[in-house]
Image: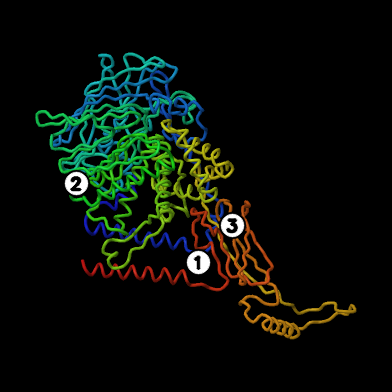
C-alpha cells in the first residue's frame, strides 16, 4: 500500500488540479532544499543541540491474557526486534531442494459465492493447520478482519477518530458497513466455541480477533482441520477492500488463522500467538500455505485473483465458478466486476523464474492506464528479479479500479495488486509518475510483503520501508523522474521533473522526527508516512556511504536467506552487516535511525580567508638592531610586493598574490554524529578535503595556502539526505544570490501559471 499517493487518484477536476499543484510545490521545496546556498541558515534553538534518540519502546502496555493452554499472545506494543532469529527459525533457509517453496503451515480450501446486489460473500472454508511447536495446542486464534468495518466502535474507527482524519483518500463509509459472521465452526464434526478477544487492549466493541477453544487439542507436530461456514458483508470501498457499484475488491474476507511463533523466531523466547487487532494503519502477517479457492459469480462478471486459474470457469444456472490454486503464499484476494474491458494480457520471462502471465483488468473509462500499468509491471519483474532474486510464481494480476472506487487502488496481495486509475496518462505529468510509481510499489510488495513475509503489524519498516527504498532505487536506475505537472501546465511549457529520492526526502520529517522507522504500525506520533519516506532515505544514505554494489549484494543475500521465512529487523541488520563487511556502519545506522530516530543537522557556520600580509610593529633586523615598522612602512612594502607580483603574473587569478592566505572553516553539529566530508575550494583552482567524524559539537578547520578561499561545502557527494537542510551545507566567501534568484523565478513562474489556470475555470 502507498498512502501518500492515493489522494492523487480519480476525483473532481478541482481535486485533481489541487493534487498536481501540491506535488508541484513539493517538487520546488524538495529541489530547493538540496541546492547549495551562500546564505547560512539561522542557528537552531538550543534544544536542538542534542541528537534525538527516541527509543522504539514506550511505556509497556498491559499484557493480554494467555490462552487456556498457557500460550501467550504477542505484546500490544511489540515493535522492531533487536535479537537475531536462530539459524533454524521457520525450518531454516530454503535451499530449493525441498518439495515446496515454503514450509507450509496451513491449507485453505474455500468455496465462495458473491451476491453482487447485497454485496455479500457466502463461504465454506476447510482450514487445515499444523502445530509446529513442541506443546499441545488447545486454542487457536482467527483474524476476522472485515469486522473492522462493522461499526464505529472497532479499533480501526476508534483510531481514525483519535487522529481526527480519514484513511488515505478520505472516503467515508457512511452507512455501508461491512462485517464477517461465523455461522459454524467444527472440528471433526464437533462444534467449536469461540470468544472475541483483544490482544492489543482495544475497545470491547472490536471483533477482529476471535479465539477458538478446540474440543480436541492439536498434538505437537500434529494437524487439525476446521470446517467453517461464514458470511462476509463487504463495505463500500473504504480501506483496502469493499464495493462500489458492480465493482468488488474482496480482500481480508475469510477467517484467517494467526501465527504461532516459536522460540528463536522474531525475538520469541517461548511459543506465542502473534495475532493483532486490525488497526488503522497496520496491515497483515500470516503463515505460508496453500490456497484452493472456487469463486462463484454472475456469468457476466470478470474475475481476477491470487494464483493460477484452473482451466476455464464452469457455467451453470447463469453463474460461473472460477477455480484458483496457489501454493506458498500467505493470503488470497480477488476482484469481480461486470464492467471490465477485455483484459490486457502480457508475458514475462527471466532467469530462474517460470514464464509469468501478466494480466491487467481495467474499466473502459481508464483504458489509458492499462498499457502503462502492464509495462511498469514487466519492468518491475525484471528489476526485482535481477537485484533481489527470481520471481517464483506464474502469474501477476493487476486491477485498475473504476471511477469512484479510488480507495481500492494501491493495495497488494500475493500475485495480485491494485494500481492507480487515470483517464489520461501523458508523458512528463504527475499522472504518469504516480501510475508508474504505485504500480512498481505494489508489485514490489510481492517481494517484501509476499516472499519475505515480514510482520507488518510490528515491523512495517521491513515491508513498506524497504519496498519504498527499492522502488526509488529502480526509478533511479531507469532514469525515471518524479514529474509534478498537470497536462495543462505541460502544454503551457511547465513540466518539472526531479529525482524520486528527492521527493522521499521532502516528505520525511527531518527537523523534528518523532517516530523511529522501527516502531510498530499503530503506535506512532507522526502516523505511518515516515515508515516509507524515512526508511527509504536512511537506506539511500547508507548505500551512499558503503557503496551501491555492496548494498545490492547484501539485499540479494537477504532474499536468499529469508525468503519464505518471516525475517525480523535484527535479521536484516545482521545480513547487511555480514554481506557488506561494514558492520560498524550498519550497526550505527540501525541504532540511531531504525531503532531510534536521530536528527541529522550539520552546518557550516563560518568561512573566513585572510591574506597574511606583514603587520606593523617592531622586529630585530640585521645586526641585532630592533626596527620599527609603521603602518605606512608596511603599506608601502605590501603595495610594492603586489605590483611586482602583478608584473610577474599578469594573468594571475583574483585571490592570489605574493602573500599566503589563512582560511578557517567552522562547522557546527546540532544533531547526531555522522561522518562528514568538507571540501574547500580556492581561487587558484586547488581544493582541500577534510573528514569530520568526531563526536563533538563544533570544529574549526584551518589551512594556509597561496590563494584565497572561494567556497566551503559539507557533504559534497550528498551522502546525508537525512540532513535537516542542505542549504546550510555550503558557504561562499562572496555573497551569491543564485539560489534565491533561481527559486524566486521558478515560484514566480508557478504563480503565473496558476493565475492563468484560475482565469480559465
Looking at the image, tell me whether mark 1 or mark 3 is earlier in sequence order. 1
Residue 112 falls in image quadrant: top left
In the image, what residue occupies the spot 59% across and 43% down? 584
Whether the residues at callouts 3 and 2 have beta carbons within 8 Å, the answer is no
In the image, what residue occupies the spot 63% across and 52% down? 694
Looking at the image, tell me whether mark 3 or mark 2 is earlier in sequence order. 2
Which mark identifies residue 363?
Answer: 2
**Disc 3 or disc 2, which is closer to the eye?**
2
> Helix or strand or loop: what does disc 3 sit on?
strand
**Disc 1 or disc 3, which is closer to the eye?**
3
Residue 415 falls in image quadrant: top left
**Disc 1 or disc 2, which is closer to the eye?**
2
Q: CA distance from mark 1 to mark 3?
A: 17 Å
> Helix or strand or loop: what does disc 1 sit on?
loop
The quarter of the picture where the C terminus appears is: bottom left
How far from the left and from the top, in percent, is residue 397? 27, 39
- Given residues 111 and 215, the one toward you in this image is 111
Q: Examine the rendered structure and indicate whether residue 454 appears above or below residue 66.
A: below
Which mark identifies residue 37?
Answer: 1
How far from the left and from the top, in percent, is residue 437? 34, 50
Q: CA distance from mark 1 to mark 2?
A: 49 Å
Judging by the rendered image, the residue that carries numbered circle 3 is 677
Residue 205 visible? The answer is no
Q: Examine the rendered structure and indicate whether residue 159 appears above or below residue 660.
A: above
Whether the residues at callouts 1 and 3 have beta carbons within 8 Å, the answer is no
Label 2 crowding class (10 Å Cα cut-off): few <14, some 14-19, many 20+? Answer: many
Amino acid at each position: 500500500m502507498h498512502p501518500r499517493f492515493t489522494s492523487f487518484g480519480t476525483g473532481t477536476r478541482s481535486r485533481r488540479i489541487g493534487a498536481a499543484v501540491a506535488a508541484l510545490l513539493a517538487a520546488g521545496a524538495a529541489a530547493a532544499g538540496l541546492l547549495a546556498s551562500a546564505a547560512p541558515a539561522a542557528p537552531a534553538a538550543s534544544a536542538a543541540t542534542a541528537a534525538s534518540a527516541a527509543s522504539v519502546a514506550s511505556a509497556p502496555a498491559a499484557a493480554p491474557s494467555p490462552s487456556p493452554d498457557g500460550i501467550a499472545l504477542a505484546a500490544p506494543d511489540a515493535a522492531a526486534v533487536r535479537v537475531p532469529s536462530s539459524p533454524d527459525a521457520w525450518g531454516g533457509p530454503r535451499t530449493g531442494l525441498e518439495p515446496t517453496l515454503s514450509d507450509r503451515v496451513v491449507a485453505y480450501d474455500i468455496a465462495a459465492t458473491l451476491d453482487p446486489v447485497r454485496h455479500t460473500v457466502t463461504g465454506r472454508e476447510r482450514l487445515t493447520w499444523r502445530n509446529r511447536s513442541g506443546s499441545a495446542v488447545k486454542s487457536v486464534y482467527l483474524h476476522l478482519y472485515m469486522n473492522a468495518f462493522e461499526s464505529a466502535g472497532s479499533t480501526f474507527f476508534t483510531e481514525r477518530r483519535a487522529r481526527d482524519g480519514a484513511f488515505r483518500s478520505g472516503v467515508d463509509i457512511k452507512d455501508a458497513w461491512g462485517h464477517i459472521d461465523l455461522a459454524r465452526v467444527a472440528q471433526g464434526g464437533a462444534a467449536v466455541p469461540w470468544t472475541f478477544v483483544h490482544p492489543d487492549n482495544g475497545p470491547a466493541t472490536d471483533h477482529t480477533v476471535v479465539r477458538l477453544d478446540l474440543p480436541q487439542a492439536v498434538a505437537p507436530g500434529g494437524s487439525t482441520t476446521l470446517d467453517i461456514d461464514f458470511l462476509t458483508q463487504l463495505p463500500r470501498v473504504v480501506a483496502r477492500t469493499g464495493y462500489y457499484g458492480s465493482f468488488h475488491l474482496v480482500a481480508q474476507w475469510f477467517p484467517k488463522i494467526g501465527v504461532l511463533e516459536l522460540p528463536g523466531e522474531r525475538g520469541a523466547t517461548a511459543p506465542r500467538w502473534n495475532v493483532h487487532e486490525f488497526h488503522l494503519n497496520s496491515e497483515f502477517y500470516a503463515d505460508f500455505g496453500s490456497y484452493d479457492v472456487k469463486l462463484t459469480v454472475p456469468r457476466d462478471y470478470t474475475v481476477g485473483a491470487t494464483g493460477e486459474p484452473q482451466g476455464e470457469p464452469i457455467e451453470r444456472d447463469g453463474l460461473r465458478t472460477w477455480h484458483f490454486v496457489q501454493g506458498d503464499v500467505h493470503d488470497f484476494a480477488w476482484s469481480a466486476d461486470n464492467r471490465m474491458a477485455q483484459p490486457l494480457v502480457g508475458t514475462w520471462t527471466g532467469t530462474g523464474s517460470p514464464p509469468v502471465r501478466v494480466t491487467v483488468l481495467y474499466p473502459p473509462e481508464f483504458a489509458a492506464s492499462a498499457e502503462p500499468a502492464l509495462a511498469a509491471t514487466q519492468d518491475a519483474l525484471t528489476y526485482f528479479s535481477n537485484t533481489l532474486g527470481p520471481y517464483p510464481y506464474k502469474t501477476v494480476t493487476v486491477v485498475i479500479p473504476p471511477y469512484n472506487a479510488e480507495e481500492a487502488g494501491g493495495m497488494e496481495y500475493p500475485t495480485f495488486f491494485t494500481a492507480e486509475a487515470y483517464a489520461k496518462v501523458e508523458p512528463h505529468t504527475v499522472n504518469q509518475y504516480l501510475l508508474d510509481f504505485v504500480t512498481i510499489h505494489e508489485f514490489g510488495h510481492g517481494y517484501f510483503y509476499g516472499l519475505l513475509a515480514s510482520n507488518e503489524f510490528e515491523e512495517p519498516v521491513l515491508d513498506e520501508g524497504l519496498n519504498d527504498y527499492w522502488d526509488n532505487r529502480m526509478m533511479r536506475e531507469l532514469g525515471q523522474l518524479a514529474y509534478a505537472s498537470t497536462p495543462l501546465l505541460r502544454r503551457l511549457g511547465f513540466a518539472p521533473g526531479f529525482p524520486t529520492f528527492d521527493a522521499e526526502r521532502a516528505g520525511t520529517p527531518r527537523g523534528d522526527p518523532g517516530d523511529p522507522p522501527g516502531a510498530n504500525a499503530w503506535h506512532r506520533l507522526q502516523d505511518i508516512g515516515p515508515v516509507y519516506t524515512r526508511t527509504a532515505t536512511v537506506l539511500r544514505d547508507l548505500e551512499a556511504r558503503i557503496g551501491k554494489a555492496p548494498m545490492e549484494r547484501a539485499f540479494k543475500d537477504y532474499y536468499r536467506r529469508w525468503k519464505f521465512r518471516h525475517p525480523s529487523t535484527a535479521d536484516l541488520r545482521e545480513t547487511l552487516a555480514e554481506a557488506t563487511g561494514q558492520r560498524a556502519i550498519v550497526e550505527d545506522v540501525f541504532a540511531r535511525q531504525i531503532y531510534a530516530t536521530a536528527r541529522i543537522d550539520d552546518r557550516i557556520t563560518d568561512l573566513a580567508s585572510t591574506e597574511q600580509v606583514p603587520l606593523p610593529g617592531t622586529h630585530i633586523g640585521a645586526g641585532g638592531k630592533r626596527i620599527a615598522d609603521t603602518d605606512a612602512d608596511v603599506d608601502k612594502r605590501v603595495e610594492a610586493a603586489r605590483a611586482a607580483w602583478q608584473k610577474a603574473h599578469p594573468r594571475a587569478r583574483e585571490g592570489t598574490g605574493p602573500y599566503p592566505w589563512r582560511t578557517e572553516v567552522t562547522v557546527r553539529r546540532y544533531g547526531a554524529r555522522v561522518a562528514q566530508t568538507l571540501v574547500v575550494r580556492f581561487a587558484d583552482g586547488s581544493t582541500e578535503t577534510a573528514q569530520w567524524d568526531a563526536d563533538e559539537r563544533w570544529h574549526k578547520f584551518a589551512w594556509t595556502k597561496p590563494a584565497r578561499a572561494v567556497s566551503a561545502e559539507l557533504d559534497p557527494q550528498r551522502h546525508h539526505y537525512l540532513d535537516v537542510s542542505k542549504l546550510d551545507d555550503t558557504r561562499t566567501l562572496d555573497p551569491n544570490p543564485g539560489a534565491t534568484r533561481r527559486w524566486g523565478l521558478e515560484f514566480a513562474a508557478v504563480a503565473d501559471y496558476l493565475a492563468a489556470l484560475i482565469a480559465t475555470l
